[in-house]
Amino acid sequence: MTIEYKILDVNELTYFTIRDIRQNAVDELVERFKNGYNPSKPLTVVDKNGILLVANGNHRLKALKELGIEQVPCIIYQDADPYKLAVEGNEDEDTYSPMDLFDWIEIISVMRNNGYNQQEIADRLGWSISKIKQHYVLINEIVTEVLDIVKGLQIGRVTKEVTNVTFDFTEGWFRNSGLYDIEDYQERLINDFIGDKCNWNNNKVKSESAKYKRWIDYTKIASDKLVNQGDLKEVTRLIEKGSFKTEEQLLSKIKDFNSKAENKLICGDCIAEMEKLEDGSIDLIITDPPYGIDYSSNRSQFNEHITKEKIANDKELSQALELTDKALEVLNNKTKSDAHLYLFTAWRVYPDFLKVVEKYFDIKNLIIWDKGNHGTGDLDGTWGNRYEMIIFATKGNRKLTKRKADIIQVSKLSSSEMIHPTQKPTELIKELLEVSAQSKDTVIDPFMGSGSTIKAIKEYGGLNYIGIELDKERFDKASIYIGGE
């Protein structure tokens, strides 16, 4: 191999670009060369049949051309391998622009496209074949859009004037990240990583990748097991909202989609009727049981007014507590392993009902319903009461679909709209559904009363319901109110 030192015209030289030329590095060289080019830094040139290829020094060549410098010292090789010389030169510790992952990706890709096999590339780069294979995997498994994104944040490629978010992406980082297994979610993870200023440690990256891998696995399970593939979009939406912590929860929801649940309005004793239901079939309980306070409103002067009507099992607190206890004991078996409960109560008996609920469910919140206007009650001796209380409790680790404040402001119904003395607005029930309901859930109200819970469920859409009411006259009114069931 012949080697020759010679001063060449800049315009005679041809770029041999096996990697990107970084403009920020060129700009630094331009400033450095304004006072003259250092002749002890000749360009490395390969003479290929009269074509002078710059194997090492392409950044310098571009800077020279921008400055209009016409000649440069060169070391000229005859018939040498430009790839080998380029790699050796770029790995030199004195190089103006050190090699990074994306340079190696570019070099390997160019050589592969030019017909070199893995062993030939390894020989020219001076690498082991296993290292080449690892880079091949990265090139094949990481989508182009992701590589383009992270390349723009690689340390040494950008300046703080452009962005203060940089990171040293390496082949090992990608190999250990879990990104290879989540092609459809790679860009999403990387954008989240960047959004947090690349501050995630390895465990955090792996944890996020594992989450997306679980979503992919769950989507595959859903695709395989759903009878109607048209339901896959909705199940995927639930998966991506993180609704399922376990495969058991997912399979339970798929079962909901595959089964044609019958909506039920039942007139009868709720304990006896609920015993007939399938175990583990209920997702959500929303109910307003008797409080045991012998409720009767002072709002109207007329004895026949709706708010003057008495409520069954409301005479004695002990009677109401016993009934609620029995109902929740049955529902503990009839609910799924992950379920939510909303139970309305009053401030005077709240501690008593709390003790009953916590026997079967985990107490999470006390929610306040601000009715917007206080009732009458004792007009001379008490403050006007404008709120009611809702105990929120859970079973298992069912996730909220939306997080809201624990004070809900919904105007109470006017008495002219009511068919039951303690009737709740459907808009209030929908507030609860927005937080806890998922598509195809089965919701039960064992103390149906006016039927407002069931009516809200029907209007909300996409849910199944079971409503039970003991009083035949009230059941008939509720059925009409709900919609002719």
Image (tube, rainbow, N blue to C red):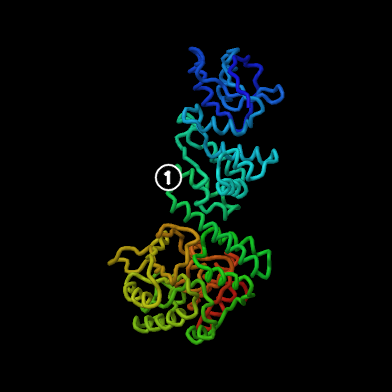
- Name which residue lies at 60% across and 19% down: 4
Spot occupied by residue 210 in the image (x, y as percentages of width and height): 51, 58
Quadrant housing the C terminus: bottom right
173 up-or-down from 76: above or below = below
Q: Quadrant of the N terminus?
A: top right
Please state if 55 lies on the left or on the right of 424 as rendered.
Answer: right
Nearer to the camera, 472 or 433: 433
The residue closer to the viewer here, 229 or 340, is 229
User: Residue 299 location, x and y as percent?
Assistant: 40, 69
User: Counting other residues with Cα less than 10 Å from the Cα at mark 1, is it few (<14), some (14-19), or many (20 or more)?
Assistant: some
The amino acid on which the numbered mark 1 sits, given as a three-letter code, is Asn
In the image as oriented, which residue stretches furthest toward the front?
Answer: 1
Q: Could you tell me which secondary element the residue under label 1 belongs to?
A: loop
Q: Position of residue 272 (x, y in %)?
A: 50, 87
Residue identified by numbered label 1: 199
Q: In the image, is residue 363 above or below residue 39?
A: below
